[in-house]
């Protein structure tokens, strides 16, 4: 019997070891898997590479992971968003690496990895410092930059509902990066507000099919976002 329900946050993240590349869903705080991030901080794997839309805010969630000194590198689109004080201090002190990737390119790199595709050309970032060191070409008068697929060892997501097969739904904007990260990662872990019986989720309501999810864990209390 397929049952992907994990009994605890701690057990769900116990598979993440030193040096792992971890995708973290969320658009700001919407869809941010805070409970999983705090469990990961407590587990303490080191030298992590984090792939996310931003570099954390305040002193919770992703920022808490950074503050604990567990992250070696961040790959993101918005490292200097409002409240990203922890990352800013670490970066200025030379204690963390940064790779800036335009948001659309970040999504397409992940999608390419999940779809089993190779590198692709995009006009985004052509002629800017972001394109330095990358192959660049002119095609029909337009400049393009070659970008590589971006896979990960793990993805941490925040869903709304899940069944024991790992089929997921998301709440409103929390859907964000979740579906594409689940495809791009080798092992996907989702914290969810509710576990529903198998068959309760209509097929056309599922946002991320269970084939892309390895573990789900129910939160003790509902957190909006």
Image (cartoon, rainbow, N blue to C red):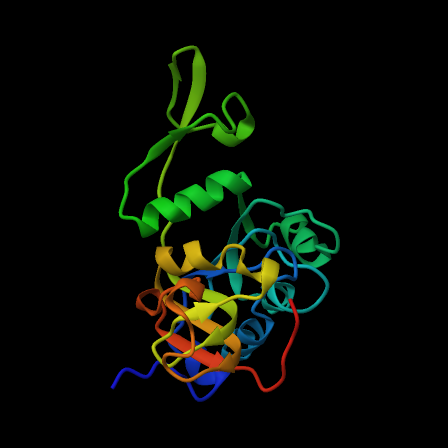
159 shown above or below 137: below
Residue 47 coordinates in the image, percent (x, y): 46, 62
Identify the residue at the far top of this view: 141
At x 63%, y 61%, the residue is: 30
- Say which quadrant the N terminus sits in: bottom left
| Front-most of residues 171 and 108 | 171
Identify the residue at the far bottom of this view: 7
Residue 11 coordinates in the image, percent (x, y): 43, 84
| Front-most of residues 14 and 27 | 27
At x 50%, y 29%, the residue is: 124
31 shown above or below 201: above
106 shown above or below 64: above
- Say which quadrant the C terminus sits in: bottom right
| Front-most of residues 68 and 215 | 215
Residue 181 coordinates in the image, percent (x, y): 43, 57
Say whether residue 79 is visible: yes
On the image, which quarter does residue 211 sit in?
bottom left
Residue 6 horizontal side relative to residue 113, left or right: right
Say whether residue 101 is visible: no
At x 69%, y 51%, the residue is: 88
Residue 74 coordinates in the image, percent (x, y): 53, 52
On the image, which quarter does residue 119 sit in?
top left
């Amino acid at each position: 019997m397929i049952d992907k329900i994990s009994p605890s946050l701690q057990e769900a993240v116990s598979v993440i070891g030193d040096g792992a590349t971890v995708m973290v869903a969320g658009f700001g705080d919407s869809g941010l898997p805070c409970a999983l991030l705090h469990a990961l901080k407590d587990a303490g794997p080191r030298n992590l590479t984090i792939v996310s839309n931003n570099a954390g805010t305040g002193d919770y969630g992703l920022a808490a992971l950074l503050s604990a000194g567990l992250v070696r590198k961040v790959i993101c689109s918005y490292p200097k968003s409002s409240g990203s004080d922890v990352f800013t201090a670490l970066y200025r002190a030379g204690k963390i690496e940064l790779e800036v990737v335009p948001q659309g390119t970040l999504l397409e790199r992940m999608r390419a990895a999940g779809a089993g595709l190779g590198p692709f050309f995009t006009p985004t970032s052509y002629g800017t410092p972001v394109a330095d060191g990358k192959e660049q070409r002119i095609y029909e008068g337009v400049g393009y930059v070659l970008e590589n697929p971006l896979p990960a060892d793990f993805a941490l997501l925040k869903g709304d509902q899940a069944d024991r097969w790992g089929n997921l739904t998301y709440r409103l904007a929390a859907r964000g990066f979740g579906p594409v990260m689940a495809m791009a990662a080798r092992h996907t872990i989702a914290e969810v507000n509710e576990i529903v019986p198998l068959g309760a989720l209509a097929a056309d309501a599922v946002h991320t099919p269970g084939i892309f999810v390895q573990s789900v864990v129910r939160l003790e209390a509902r957190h909006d976002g």
